[in-house]
Image: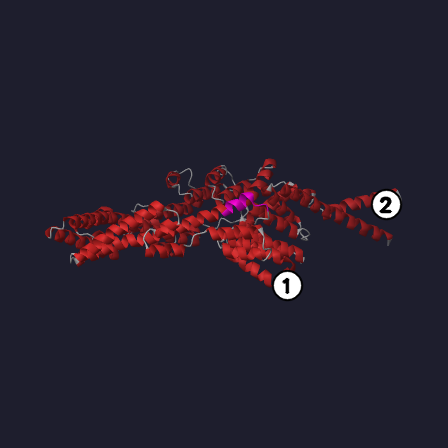
Amino acid sequence: MKKYIYILILFFCSVSFSNDELARQYEYADKLFNDQNYFEAITEFKRLSFFDEKNVYAYESNYKIGIAYKYGGFYDNSVFYLSHAIRTTENIDERIQAEFQIVRCNILRKTTDRALQLLSQMEKDSVYSNHQNEIHYWKGWSYMISDRWDSAAESFANISDDHELKILSEQVSNDKYSVTFARVISYILPGAGQFYTGNYLSGLMSLAWNVLWGYLTINSFIENRAFDGVAIGSLLWLRFYRGNIQNAEKLAVQKNIEIANTALLYLMENYRGEKP
Amino acid sequence: MNSPLITRFIFLFVFLSLINAQDKNGYFSLENRLKFGNFLFCKGDYIRAIDEYNFVLTKQNNDTLKFKIALAYQKLERYDESENSFKELFTSQQFGSEAKFEYFKTLYLSDKFETMHKRIADDSFIESSISDKLKRLYNLKHLYSSKSIEDSSKFFQPFNQNESIELLKFYVRKQNLDNKSPALAAVLSAIIPGLGKVYTENYGDGITAFLLTGVLTFLAIDNFNADHNFRGWLFTTLAAYFYAGNIYGSAASAVLFNANVRMNFDSDLTLFLNKNNHFSSNSNLFCK
């Protein structure tokens, strides 16, 4: 009997010896990961997964492979491994951690609709009741990346009224030009939309061309040459009138892109909070 | 405990450790690196599979691994490296023929038509076992060429009857690509404004160009007749602008038309050939 007990003890000793090897491989992969050597880290975590038949490190491996792919800019691969990590764990905190990383990958790969959809599902789920601020935070980021700064400001306001990103979002929202307003004032006075967006030369040119073709059109009608009036009116005046409206819209959109890009650049270079 | 018993326990410990930790120290053993490399290869992680295989190759010579590395480069679309790797295997007893075929397929995938042409004419390169497979790829490449295929019997010869029936549709379509001449389109528009656009099947633009140029010319003449010289010159300038623009536009329209026809043909052909694996055997021999 004693003999069998000794054998059993020895067997467990040897099993733990084998697990130690897995632990060593995990430490090695993790070291590469912490050293930001993501390519090698992915290889070693994959090696760990391959030999980890009992899935002892399944979550850690898949999660860190996902994160390493994220840092490498391979967001599809990242989402694949993070989703796999979720399937390999029953631990709620680990699932939540991976879910948020998937949201962040979606923000980075600009599939913000998917990020918002995931966040809305999380918002309704009682499991995430202690993570509401985090949900609002990433919702705000999703809106910022999708150029919906008003909604971003609302999301950040749910966290705090003086949240740095709320103030930034509001500022961007206020700075942006109204494309509709630029179009409408250009309907009323050609060139006004360009003036509104600060493109004075373009505005003056638009106004001058419209005055010239307008004068010639009206002059033709006054001289009882209606056909000339229709031709100049439709081919020149209307063309320049429509061009002026389209130009005003285009300039407003361009200015808005510049404003949004400046804000995003600020976030990238100067913002100290958590980024996707 | 007496000493023989201790010795037996130590022996047992080592034995059980080896069973349980069969892969451990061995995570980086040649055998395990090979296993891991095969796993990565079949999962499509070719870059890492190549690294594992290369490590094994530093310790032992293995044509299978060299062949798989060449295939991995081909899958990664690193065609130059793939070509060089396959070339090294031309003299391999085990993979010589397959390497020549895959090398030829790499040339086909990387659009090196000239090199394909040289290789197909080289008797020392062609082996009877792969001759038909090479000719198929070579003939399929002809479908992408802008030149017409002169001998249809030669084209279909390496394919079986079913394959020939499937390819016939593309062969006929390629031989009768409906191209338009840019010069003719420009001349037609110079004679009657808009006619070049009608020729390139841009009917709406053609009719618009005809009406606009006609109306503007009429207005120019009418204004000169009525001594409204400013408006006369204005309409003359507009008519000339539309007339010249239409000639240039007709030629451009013909070029666009041809590019569109060619693009549609190439894209349909590529879809069809990808679906049929380019009428060559499945190269994924190593994964279930």
Query: Where in the figure is residue B44, as x and y percent of width and height?
Result: 54, 48
Image location (x, y in percent) of residue A193: 36, 52
Q: Main secondary structure of the magenta part?
A: helix
Instruction: Give the residue number, with chain letter if any, for mark 2.
Output: B5
Q: How is the image coloured?
A: secondary structure
The answer to whether residue B266 is visible is: no
Q: Chain of mark 1?
A: A
| Quadrant position of residue B118 | top left
Of badges 1 and 2, nearer the viewer stands 1
Distance between the Cα atoms at labels 1 and 2?
60 Å
Please tell me whether residue A151 belongs to the stretch shown in magenta. Answer: no
Viewer-proximal residue among B279 and B95: B279
Residue A59 or residue B113, whichever sits in front: A59
At horizontal 69% and vertical 42% (from top left) the residue drawn is B25
Which x, y percent locates residue B184? 21, 48
Q: Secondary structure at mark 2?
A: helix
- Per the image, the residue denoted by label 1 is A126
Q: Per the image, is A269 magenta? A: yes
Q: Residue at x 55, y 57 (%)?
A: A155
In the rendered structure, the answer to whether residue B151 lies left or right of residue B95 reads left
Q: Which residues are magenta?
A: A263-272
Which amino acid does the dot numbered 1 rest on? Answer: Ser
SS at badge 1: helix
